[in-house]
Amino acid sequence: MARPHRSTLERREALLRLVTSGISRVEELGSRLEVSPSTVRRDLAALEDSGQLSRTYGGAIMPAPFRDRALSERVAVNAESKTGIGLASVGLVHAGATIFVDAGSTTLALVDALDGVEGVTVVTRGLENAITLVGRPGISVHVVGGALTPASHGTTGPLALEALGRFAFDLAFLGCDAVSPALGVGEPTLEEAYVKEFAATRARRTVVLADASKLCTRGVAAWAPLPHGWTLVTDCREETLLAPFERQGVDVIRA
């Protein structure tokens, strides 16, 4: 897929800012950006395809507020994309590595792909991750304790932090409900956000796994800042979404 020209990226970012501010009609958007209505409509179509807004008759609105979904529901959403992200991520794991694997449907795709790498130690806060990995040759599994979250089946709280503090990770693989180049990863609760932030401080490299829908979610309550130079693995091909990450120094891997 051809990448949009830089001026196109900048115009679409400006268009998003205008829609976010409440300006929604095609004619007014075109006037503000000094472009034709047909150009605005093309940009709105591209932004809708990438999930950043929703078009209406004669204009656009921002997408519906974020809703936290159960893990069983998440697994069925964008399943093919998540499989590709998992396969791309497993290539980062070297023999003998100690890795943290977060709870969630996209990190579960990484776990499914984690075969053939010898001597890997996996520390996880996700129950499904541990059940999937237990008994696999060459993989040692440690489950982080703590309070269990109903949606993701992941552990949080002081017991989780105590266990994570005993490890040093080569890689920390984080899932998310939203991801921002400036804010890091977004979660429904402060407890979930903080356990991700803490895991990142224990890792030499932090890798966020996020399908394209996670790059534009609004209304997420809590955010975990990440260390400079973190990595994003995503199926997204929309350069309007990816360019801000690269400008912030994020290493973007396109699955």
Image (cartoon, rainbow, N blue to C red):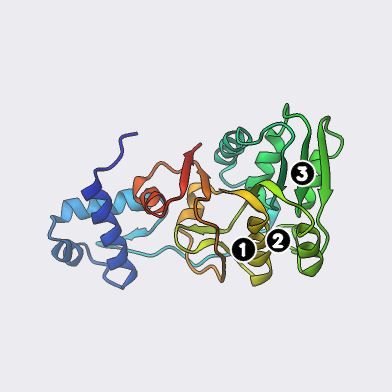
**Residue of label 1:** 68
Labelled pair 2, 1 in contact (Cβ < 8 Å): yes
Tell me the kind of residue under disc 1.
Asp
Choose the circle earlier in sequence order: 3 or 2: 3
How far apart are the two marked residues, 2 and 1, measured between alpha carbons? 7 Å
Choose the circle earlier in sequence order: 2 or 1: 1
Residue at x 54% of width, y 39% of height: 81
Labelled pair 1, 3 in contact (Cβ < 8 Å): no
Tell me the kind of residue under disc 3.
Val
Mark drawn on residue 122: 3
Foreground: 232 or 49?
232
Residue at x 16% of width, y 56% of height: 37
Residue at x 76% of width, y 50% of height: 124
**Residue 50 pos. (x, y %):** 40, 49
Q: Nearer the viewer, mark 3 or mark 2?
A: 3
Q: Residues within 10 Å of mark 3 (few under 14, many from 20)?
A: many
**Residue 61 pos. (x, y %):** 35, 65
Residue 118 falls left or right of residue 4: right
Q: Residues within 10 Å of mark 2 (few under 14, many from 20)?
A: some
**Residue of label 2:** 151
- Does any portion of residue 230 appear in the rendered image? yes
Snapshot quadrant of residue 70: bottom right
Q: Residues within 10 Å of mark 1 (few under 14, many from 20)?
A: few
Q: Nearer the viewer, mark 1 or mark 3?
A: 3
* Quadrant of image for the N terminus: top left
**Which secondary structure, mark 1?**
loop
- Does any portion of residue 57 appear in the rendered image? no
Foreground: 1 or 48?
1
